[in-house]
Amino acid sequence: MIDRDLARRLGGRHLLAELESKLGTVSDQANHSVRLVTSTVMADTLAGQHLIWMLANLLARQFAIVHKIEIQIPPNVAVRSQAVLFPIAAAKTNLADAIATTVTLIAADTIEVVIVDSADTQVDFEVFIGYDNSSSSAPYSLGVYADGWNLYVGDPSTTPAMTPVSAMPFGPYFAACIAAAEVFKFFRKLKAGAGSFARNVFLSLWNFQVADAWEDLPKTTDIPVYIPPFYLAGAGAVGQALACTLAAAPCEDMYVTVIDHDKIDDEGTNLNRCPLATQEDIGAMKSVLTAECLCGRSIDVFIHENKWEHYLDSNNRRPQRADVAALECDLKYPIIVSCVDKNPARHALQKCWPEYLIGGSTNGMGIEVSSYDMESMYECLMCFNPLPKVSSIEEAAARFKGLTSEEQKNQAKQFGIDLDSILQYLDSPECGSIAENELRKFADAERAPRASVGFVSVGAGVVLAVQLVKYAREGRSTFSVDLGNSIRFNFLEPSRFRWSKHRRKDKCECSNRGRDTYHRLWDIS
């Protein structure tokens, strides 16, 4: 028996009503099953194992959405350790056991996992990884294929029947994200007009273009993945996905400074989206999990278990590597990757005026990866993420008073507010009272939990890794001046990427004092 109460608690963030304008509600009586079928051609390739490991990882985090996962992999396929990033799972003697162990480590008693030899049982959703000419009796079936930077998701009958040769995880990981999204949308019942399912989608992460056939996608080759020393600010869901992607890639001589002050919360509600966290990691530091993954792939890591602002004072930490420390003495931070999720933290990063700043974020079912390039015409991280306006106590009190009694109770529960104190304040306002602190909680809009889903966060991290790798290789041209400074993808409409432009705001510090500081730091005339 699966633990449905635990599943609903762990899946709280992807069960929020915020998504119900696009997707249906989840029944407590549902019993959704998925079968993962890996073709013989795919199972023994690095691309195939990248894909099935990440897909199993993501499906195992769909708490209260997915209830059973069947794994059908050809027998005696050896595990490629570079594809399975959990050491306990990678130690298994065959791939099927490694994938089943991955699901169990994440989901524990919330999802049943079964290894099967054939498709004898009826399931609700069947995913064919690689071309498979067998028919499916499932109500919905999906074909998935990837090689290097390119991927296919759609009708199983038109899945490319080729053997992938690339060691790059980019296409496989993003294909896994789209496939996991299709499962999520199917079981959550995508509403009419709210989006579409992926049918014959050929995408390339090399140029973010779509094609009508696999042969029309860019012909890419494996390139050594080298990135100069950089700072990863934020080791939550997006930051961990970036780390996963780099750890799975053939990297050379990489040095990462990982900075995060937060833990996988004691309730485990981060598990639905942090791809490196398992049930055993509840209460663990996010920065430590991220560092362990990178170190396990021979990537050198400096770890700081606190906020960026705390890191900036070298008295707060152990010494950095000599070359990095020398730059920091001159207040130079060449490459910062922003994976923080609060605007004050984003402002702190931008005010260091790094030579290059790139960031990834999520919003509902959409991802956005942006370059905050001070040498471009586009926005910096501050003007793209303005600080929230602080409501006065009187404004907050008026808004709270306008709620119904039931809404007041719900808001109090959601924000951890002392309802009796606020109601007393509304009857007899007193400055400096305890109730003012409670109203400030209500006024802080950023405290409101937002819907978040694992495949969205991982998708953002994958695209962020892609753009970081391309920047290290090609420079600023990875974000075209003509196309814009942001690349977007929405899993509700998984047919293409979109570019957007956000021009710099004249009133932002980056348009005057910040620009001058940047030019002085980086010797730009």
Image (spheres, rainbow, N blue to C red):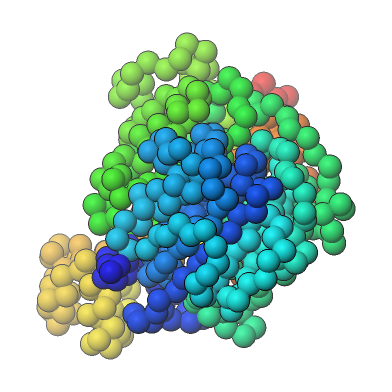
Residue drawn at 82 percent across, 54 percent down: 214
Residue 149, horizontal then vertical, whole percent: 72, 44
Using the rendered view, name the quadrant where residue 358 is placed.
top right
Quarter of the image with the C terminus is top right
Using the rendered view, name the quadrant where residue 198 is placed.
bottom right
Q: Is residue 79 among what the camera can see?
A: yes
In-front residue for pair 75/89: 75
Residue drawn at 75 percent across, 60 percent down: 159
Residue drawn at 51 percent across, 75 percent down: 122
Residue 102, horizontal then vertical, whole percent: 42, 48
Above or below — where is 154 with respect to 287? below
Q: Is residue 338 among what the camera can see?
A: no
In-front residue for pair 171/367: 171
Q: Is residue 276 left or right of residue 355?
A: left
Residue 515, horizontal then vertical, whole percent: 63, 35
Above or below — where is 473 with respect to 104? above
Residue drawn at 61 percent across, 47 percent down: 43
Residue 176, horizontal then vertical, whole percent: 59, 55
Q: Residue furthest right?
A: 216
Q: Is residue 66 left or right of residue 265?
A: right
Quarter of the image with the N terminus is bottom left
Q: Is residue 12 left or right of residue 148?
A: left
In-front residue for pair 267/429: 267
Above or below — where is 515 with respect to 107? above
